Amino acid sequence: MERYVCTGCSLLCDDIIVSSDGIYIDQVIGACLKGKERFDLVNSENRILNPLVRQNNILEKASWDLALDKTTELLKNAKNPLLYGFSTTSCEAQLRGLELASDINGFIDSNSSICQGKVLNETINAGITFSTITEIINKADLIILWGCNAAESIPRLLNKTLYSRGKFRITGREIKTLIIIDPVKNASFNTMGVRDIPLIIKPGKDLELIKALKENCCATEGTPPEGVAGLDKEDMRRLLQQLGGAEYGVIFVGQGLLTPLENSNLITELLELVNIINSKQQKGRISVMMMGGHYNMVGFDHVALSMYGKNGAIQFKDNHFTNTDDTLITKIQNEDFDCSLFIGTDPISHLPFSLSSKLVKKPIILIDNHKNASYEFANIVLPTAITGIECDGLAYRLDHIPIEVKKIINPPNKIPTDADLLTQIIQKIKSNR
Amino acid sequence: MRTYLHKSFKKLSQTGDPKIKFLLNTVRLMENDQTKEYGLGDIDSLEEKLALTFLNPNDYESINPSKKPNLKISSKYGEVVVKVVEDENVHEGTILMPISIWSNQLTGVKGTKLIYKNISVDLEATEQKLDDFKSILKKIRGA
């Protein structure tokens, strides 16, 4: 039995006990449902075990040589390729992805650009008070879930941060307050105790609430009698009391706060609110943490930032980085691509119809370990090993801490890792020039 | 508590306008997770877990449908037919859908931003069969 890191979500729990002989996994102890599902993928019926090439509109099993030749041909002939995904791969694969994009003059982006990357972009102007999971465990007395359902998206987050006992929080859960701000009484509400504060706001009224908090920061006098955003005066009083009185508070931000508005940006408003609170506080502080779900979504931001000073939407021209205002959305919307390569993602399922229907018009190369909706449209499918189970790699936790994930067993059919496969494609493209 | 409704809707005949405006929010749920279904399930489980919407029981009553097993949801971005799950935790006037290829028939792009939350939708009880996975793929392919 040995301890491993789970790659089921961005929390990258490093306390998973796995019993294995190096060939099979016998037992996994301590993983949540999501983690368990990740391990179950190893022997899933939907696992892709061989390369596939579409011929006569049917995906047919192909040799690695044929599949790689077809991939190279497609990418080499493409004038404007689009590379997307990279949040469920290792940093090593992300680096290879950027290298490939540079070699073929492509546009590359990760899932982060439509998720937590949006927060990172806003921090350039507004700044951010950040925190780590360890700090939260040791110091936090206030945990706020705003527009996110931690119990279902990152299942052990509350176990680690709310129910834990830290250096300065020896009494654990008893001394910590949980506030949930959400229009939906989601599963996270079930974790709430007597001293916690459930705040069910009216849908789409987050901005109204943030603005009211900014105006009345640390004082309840300004709260109108009818309340704000569906919260009554007593709710507002308790919320302001907690925000102003916490020694160490953290706001976890979910997709609910990433919704675009006409003339405002919710994230900027929230970051400004946190700055106001922190400047008024004598001894306490509030920090903000993004809730990206994929296990290495943060990794791409770091790898891309360190290479090109930009965390996503990177365009290459003449094999060099070039500034562009294009985003993944504009590229697809304007059909400004002639083929796409998806790695560890399923944009046909997770993008709106207006975009997915445009993606399928151009050839698709899919690199993944299991079938999905994008598989149904792919021209070439290349299977890879499951990182953190069948291969090593570096990943960044949701609090931007790098963590090494380890290999437990060999992948079936000698399937390559994402990084190795991308390296092979790069070499093949270079040798064919 | 969520209850999968197999019974027929009631009172549709009493309503003047069968279409009612709601706000759609797409959400990530552990029990209705597309990654899990693609990875470990099959087409039946995919449709069972994802081709659905959660609706407040009071709204369910006010829609007044009768003998119509499914719900046609239309937004300015598209439409989809799914089944209904009654959930008292859903705000009245809103519906929830798990993030999936079904919910993404209703989401869209505004300018350069993706719209996944607070989408205005019309609901209409229908006898049409729900849009199965293959028909959604066909729709995407054919657009």
Image (cartoon, grey):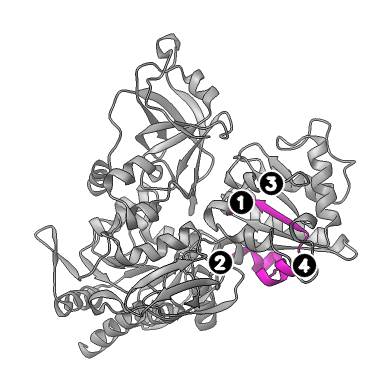
Query: Closer to the observer: label 1 or label 3?
Result: 3
* Residue A125 drawn in magenta: yes
Asked which quadrant contains residue B127, the reply is top left
Query: Closer to the observer: label 3 or label 2?
Result: 3
Determine contact: label 4, label 3, CB under 8 Å.
no
* Residue B20 drawn in magenta: no
- Give the mark nearest the N terminus, 4 or 3: 4
Determine contact: label 1, label 2, CB under 8 Å.
no
Q: Camera-side residue: A49 or A209?
A: A49
**Rendered residue at 74%/37% (across/down):** A231
**Rendered residue at 62%/70% (across/down):** A399
Residue that badge 4 annotates: A139
Q: What stretch is highlighted in magenta?
A: A121-150
Asked which quadrant contains residue A105, the reply is bottom left
Q: Distance between the residues labelled 4 and 2?
A: 18 Å
Q: Position of residue A165 (x, y in %)?
A: 73, 65
- Give the mark nearest the N terminus, 3 or 2: 2
Task: Pick out the residue farthest to the top.
Answer: B14
Residue that badge 3 annotates: A192
Label 3: chain letter: A
Q: Distance between the residues labelled 1 and 2?
A: 20 Å
